[in-house]
Amino acid sequence: MMKKFHKIVKRLKKKIKSAVKKSKVKKQKKQEKNVINESSKIAIKIPFIGSKVKPKQFEIITPDGIDIKLNFYENKNSKKGLILLPMLGKTKESMDSLAQSFYKAGYNCVAVDYRGHGGSELNWQSFRSKDFANMVYDAKAAKDFLKAHKVNSIGVIGASIGANIALNFLTMDSEVKTAIAISPGIDYRGVKVDYSIPYIKVPVLIFTSKGDNYSFVSTQHIQKLCSSPNLCIDVVEGDGHGMELLSNPKTRKHVMKKMQKWIEMFV
């Protein structure tokens, strides 16, 4: 009887040992699976982080002989391009987020350091009205740069004083397909749009906010003057001005979505 009992105990120990071993193997496999899953998540994230394109920097000469700097987000598979015009006192780098978004959507982008800004020649703080008005030649130089890189369908986006430059540029160059003006004004530092607006024929999208009084009133005046059959004015909530409409979480999604649709239609 005792021998039989010992045999039963021995068998039970083996079964328990085997069950424990299987449990450990199962647990180890589960841990390995979790590690693989976590690795997959990381692998998905890394390319997204690393997908931000680094722009190439160029120095070019404007039609009136001023050296300016550009950031070029080159999309070699596309013949479409955008000129990005910053706010007063801001550099080409302030347009990076916008450039990255449109680059990923398939566009070549050129962000401009106006004369007197960033790495470009002169100092804007000593400018007179005429000097500011001449910044339209910086947009012209950027457009010629894109054309030299075989980009033949071009739009322009500007914020604040850049919005005014964009609108004036439309009357200087008939090849530009459209403009998006973010918070334009009738007169920013001598960059006036009331003379050029009646001659604009291409599609124009304007953003302004209810609380940005000068731009809001200016936009109403622009609407009366503009003869373009495709003028669209979008008034958003708040008091954001210029690129603030794209940095504010409350307005960014709406503004960006509408901009992308507009560019897709006309460029």
Image: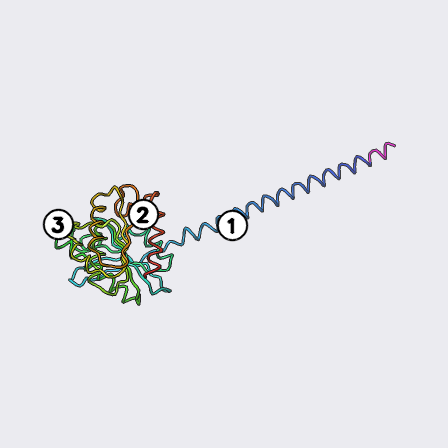
Q: Amino acid at mark 1?
A: Ser
Q: Amino acid at mark 2?
A: Leu
SS at circle 1: helix
Q: Residues within 10 Å of mark 1 (few under 14, many from 20)?
A: few
Marks 3 and 1 in Cβ contact (< 8 Å): no
Is 113 or 177 nearer to us in this picture?
177
Image: 94 above or below 145:
above
In 3D space, how far apart are the residues under numbered discs 2 and 3 (Cα atoms)? 29 Å
Q: Which residue is mark 2?
A: 246
Is 260 or 66 nearer to us in this picture?
260
The answer to whether any part of residue 91 appears in the image is no
Is 182 or 87 nearer to us in this picture?
182
Q: Bounds of the magenta span?
A: 1-6
In 3D space, how far apart are the residues under numbered discs 3 and 1 (Cα atoms)? 55 Å
Q: Which mark is residue 126?
A: 3
Q: Position of residue 38 (x, y in %)?
A: 52, 46
Q: Amino acid at mark 3?
A: Ser
Q: Position of residue 47 (x, y in %)?
A: 44, 53
Q: Position of residue 109 (x, y in %)?
A: 31, 58
Q: Determine which quarter of the picture holds residue 141.
A: bottom left
N-terminal label among 3 and 1: 1
The answer to whether any part of residue 47 appears in the image is yes
Q: Which residue is mark 1?
A: 40
Relative side of 120 to 9, left or right: left
Marks 1 and 2 in Cβ contact (< 8 Å): no
Quadrant for the C terminus, please: bottom left
SS at circle 2: helix
Q: Residues within 10 Å of mark 2 (few under 14, many from 20)?
A: some
